[in-house]
Image (cartoon, helix red, strand yellow):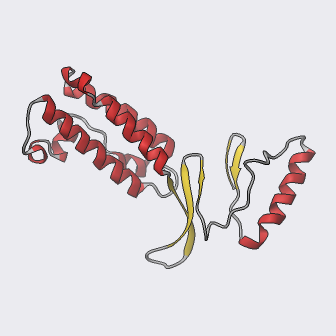
């Protein structure tokens, strides 16, 4: 069972879903609570994935073990929201600010996002989002300093960590678990 405030998700074997729903309904009624009938549904995640509180949950087969498991990662909508926030921090209007200040703002955006979403299988998603943010920053700095070529050679990952103090998500996300 995964829960957050008044929302929850129960993962169980396919044949037990209806029985668990009935038991849960009786338990809630005894406490004078009710289901939201519009949101309540039984889904076989082996056939169709679901989205729950910004996460996508689907039934997948493990690469190494070949065992099936419920795979939860950030939904595409959540990822798009982060991209929009990073884009907003790297607009034309911010080119007159010092690069370290802008990187600090991007760090604030990404730290909040990673802190709220490091659950589930997030490493691959974090890698893609970190690459997006770094490339976006490279283009922003290239435009700020009127550079059109050699952005990857000039703005290396080591320079991001050293000079600009860009926060590395993947290491921090692994440490917070």
Q: Say above or below: 135 vs 102.
A: below
Q: Say above or below: 144 vs 151.
A: above
The one of 177 and 66 positioned closer to us in this rendering: 66
Q: Say above or below: 130 vs 108.
A: below
- Provide residue 67's location: percent of width, then percent of height: 54, 77
Residue at 72% from the left image edge and 71% from the top image edge: 14
Residue at 41% from the left image edge and 40% from the top image edge: 82
Left or right of 54 in this view: 82? left
- Provide residue 42's location: percent of width, then percent of height: 73, 61
- Where residue 155 sits, quadrant-wise, is top left
The one of 133 and 157 positioned closer to us in this rendering: 133
Q: How many marks?
A: 0
The single residue placed furthest to the right in the displayed view is 30
Q: Say above or below: 5 vs 144.
A: below
Residue at 38% from the left image edge and 46% from the top image edge: 172
Left or right of 89 in this view: 154? left
- Provide residue 126's location: percent of width, then percent of height: 38, 51
- Where residue 156 sits, quadrant-wise, is top left
- Provide residue 92's location: percent of width, then percent of height: 24, 26
The one of 47 and 106 positioned closer to us in this rendering: 47
Left or right of 5 in this view: 151? left
The single residue placed furthest to the front in the displayed view is 38
- Where residue 86 sits, quadrant-wise, is top left
Residue at 10% from the left image edge and 30% from the top image edge: 145
């Amino acid at each position: 069972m995964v829960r957050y405030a008044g929302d929850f998700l129960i993962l169980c074997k396919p044949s037990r879903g209806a029985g668990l729903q009935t038991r849960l309904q009786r338990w809630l009624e005894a406490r004078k609570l009710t289901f939201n009938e519009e949101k309540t549904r039984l889904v076989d995640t082996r056939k169709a994935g679901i989205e729950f509180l910004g996460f996508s949950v689907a039934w997948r087969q493990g690469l190494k073990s070949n065992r099936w498991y419920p795979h939860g990662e950030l939904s595409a909508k959540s990822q798009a929201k982060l991209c929009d926030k990073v884009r907003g921090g790297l607009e034309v209007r911010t080119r007159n600010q010092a690069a370290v200040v802008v990187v600090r703002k991007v760090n604030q955006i990404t730290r909040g996002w990673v802190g709220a979403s490091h659950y589930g299988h997030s490493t691959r998603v974090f890698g893609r989002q970190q690459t997006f943010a770094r490339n976006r920053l490279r283009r922003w700095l290239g435009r700020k300093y009127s550079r059109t070529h050699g952005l990857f050679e000039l703005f290396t990952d080591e320079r991001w960590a050293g000079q600009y103090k860009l926060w590395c998500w993947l290491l921090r996300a692994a440490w917070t678990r």
